[in-house]
Amino acid sequence: MLQELPEDQRADAVNSMVYEANARIRYPVYGCAGAIFQLQKHISELQADLVKAQVEILNVQTQNANLVALICTEMTQNQEHNSSSTVSPDHQQAYGNSTTFLEDNSVYATWEPLWT
């Protein structure tokens, strides 16, 4: 049978036969097919893990985008509120006009669903 193969393929054929013979000794029922099945199963599990990781990455990116949008919205609303409200000169001199959206406790309540 080896004589029918081209010379450059004979070494690979012998290696394959040796591998199959060793697999038959270790796994008499399935031989190489059992090893191939186990490898395919492992590949499927790794592909499922990869998909889970990709989904988690997308979830984190979406949460990040939502958080950035929320921060921008709150900043815009605070800026509009600060520019439209009248502040007495005494109050402005004593406290400055440096209120930020982070000082408003109602903002944190809006973010809470993103952390759970």
Image (cartoon, rainbow, N blue to C red):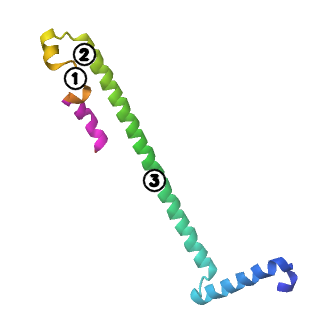
Amino acid type shown at disc 1: Thr
Total marks in image: 3
Query: Relative to 62, is 23 above or below?
Result: below
Residue 1 visible from this viewpoint: no
Dot 2 alpha-carbon crowd within 10 angstroms: few under 14, some 14 to 19, many 20 or more: some
Q: Which residues are magenta?
A: 105-115
Q: Secondary structure at mark 2?
A: helix
Query: Relative to 15, is 111 above or below?
Result: above
Residue at screen point 53% across, 68% down: 42
Amino acid type shown at disc 2: Asn
Q: Quadrant of the C terminus?
A: top left
The image quadrant of residue 39 is: bottom right
Residue at screen point 20% across, 27% down: 104
Mark 1 or 3, nearer chain start: 3
Q: Secondary structure at mark 1?
A: loop
Name the residue tied to disc 1.
99
Query: Relative to 30, is 56 above or below?
Result: above
Badge 1 vs badge 2, beta-carbon distance below 8 Å: yes
Q: Nearer the viewer, mark 1 or mark 3?
A: 1
Q: Is residue 109 left or right of residue 90?
A: right
Dot 3 alpha-carbon crowd within 10 angstroms: few under 14, some 14 to 19, many 20 or more: few
Task: For marks 1 and 3, give the CA distance.
Answer: 40 Å
Residue 82, numbered circle: 2
Q: Quadrant of the N terminus?
A: bottom right
Residue at screen point 69% across, 86% down: 18
Residue furthest bottom as drawn: 25
Name the residue tied to disc 3.
53
Residue 78 visible from this viewpoint: yes
The image shows residue 92 at horizontal and vertical percentages of 17, 14
Dot 1 alpha-carbon crowd within 10 angstroms: few under 14, some 14 to 19, many 20 or more: few
